[in-house]
Amino acid sequence: MAARSTLFVLGLCVAALCFACGCCTPALPGRASVAGNSVTLDAPSLDAPVNLVRNSDFRAELAPWRTTKGHEHLFTIIDTPRGPCPRAVRATVDADSVPNEWDIMLRQAIDEPLPEGEDLVLKAWLRSPQSCRASFFVELGRDPWTKSPFLLTELTPEWREYELRGTCAQPFGIDDAQVGFHLAHDTGTIDIAGVSLTAADVVFGSLSRRATPERPKPLIVNGDFRAPLEGNWETSGPEYLEMTVSDQDGPASPVLSIRSTPTSDLKPWDVCLFQTSRIPLREGEEVHVSFRARSAEKSRISVLFEGAYEPYTKILQQELLLTPDWRDYSFSTTVGGMYGRGETHLKFYLGHEAANLELAGVRADSHGQVEPAQPTPADDQ
């Protein structure tokens, strides 16, 4: 097989670093000082990049990595004491048994939102005694499977570290993006170890990437209703709700049409549409909530961003009387406490009264921490 390395992203940088067993070691994060036989590692800087890949060294077997259905038996965890990492995953591939190279793959969803244009660095150690080809990438985890970035390369029998640099071709919500490896190009074995994905704005000092007004951090997913509601949006009192998503002409599309029929004994919050945010928030972060809505019947609703557990602290709350024409609504507030993943949610109360309404373009974003006002020095008397 002729040696070949094909690059598909303009401006992508690929580094192949040979790992000769016993004569060199992979770089350690942070700074290290050596005295005799002891090595002291400094704690990583708050600005040190965070690896967005979980179980990147396969110490926890394959979880949360996923394989293509029906091919789980092709993947095994092996010990590599003289390799770049103590453990690796080995794929044993018969390329003639499947029609496409992506029919045997290893992938992991990224539990972090990434904005369009985010700088990404993807690294992995790979080897193949048969010099099989492999492709690896960051992509949208559903149709049309947009790659950003992508590399197809011929591997070597020795361990090599491959590095890809690129940018997000589109914004990704939580679990929208995935790191993946297509492995059915050729027949043979492929070993993978030490996978990492870092993004410019995801650093050690924050649980999630730093937000700014220019690059807000999405707090919810599927606010445009282009994906199914299952798995992201939830309801209370579903027996009182009818909801459909449709494309419409005009300023808003797709549109979520909602018919709410609460009984008189219910509270407004007994019938609601909500989504739990998987993004942590720090005290002082500025949260913005916006959406489009209309109601021919001038229905009354409430929108809230609140703590997801008792006492359900209200971070933002507005009661609205909708208009027959489309109207843009936008609200902002500053977070007064610390909230971890899954500890806040965006909620629409739909149980004030019987209602027919339409929603579109729902967003909840963090614009970053508000800089405290500097005290004004008193004039000299």
Image (tube, rainbow, N blue to C red):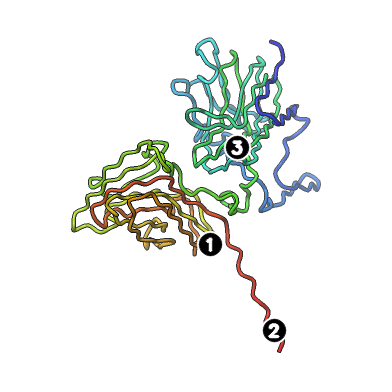
In the image, farthest residue toward the bottom: 381
**Which residue type carries mark 2?**
Asp
SS category of the residue bearing label 3: loop
Q: Which residue is mark 1?
A: 283
**Image location (x, y in percent) of residue 170:** 56, 37
Give the spatial CA distance, label 1 vs label 2: 32 Å
Q: Which residue is mark 3?
A: 168
Q: Nearer the viewer, mark 2 or mark 3?
A: 2
Q: Nearer the viewer, residue 157 or 198?
A: 198
Q: Nearer the viewer, residue 120 or 67?
A: 120
SS category of the residue bearing label 2: loop
**Which residue type carries mark 3?**
Cys
In the image, farthest residue toward the left: 264
Tell me which residue sits at (31%, 39%) in the image: 244
Q: Is residue 230 left or right of residue 238?
A: right
**Image location (x, y in percent) of residue 37:** 78, 44
Mark with earlier residue (1, 2): 1
Label 2 Cα crowd, 10 Å radius (few <14 / some 14-19 / many 20+): few
- Specify the quadrant that holds the C terminus: bottom right
| Residues under numbered marks 1 and 3 in contact, where contact means CB atoms less than 8 Å apart | no
**Image location (x, y in percent) of residue 80:** 64, 28
Label 1 Cα crowd, 10 Å radius (few <14 / some 14-19 / many 20+): few
Q: Nearer the viewer, residue 257 or 186?
A: 257
Mark with earlier residue (2, 3): 3
Place residue 284 in its image quadrant: bottom right
SS category of the residue bearing label 1: loop
Q: Which residue is mark 2?
A: 379
- Specify the quadrant that holds the N terminus: top right
Tell me which residue sits at (46%, 54%) in the image: 289
How many discs mark residues in the rendered view? 3
Question: Is the residue 354 above or below the residue 131 in the image?
Answer: below
Question: Is the residue 37 above or below the residue 345 in the image?
Answer: above
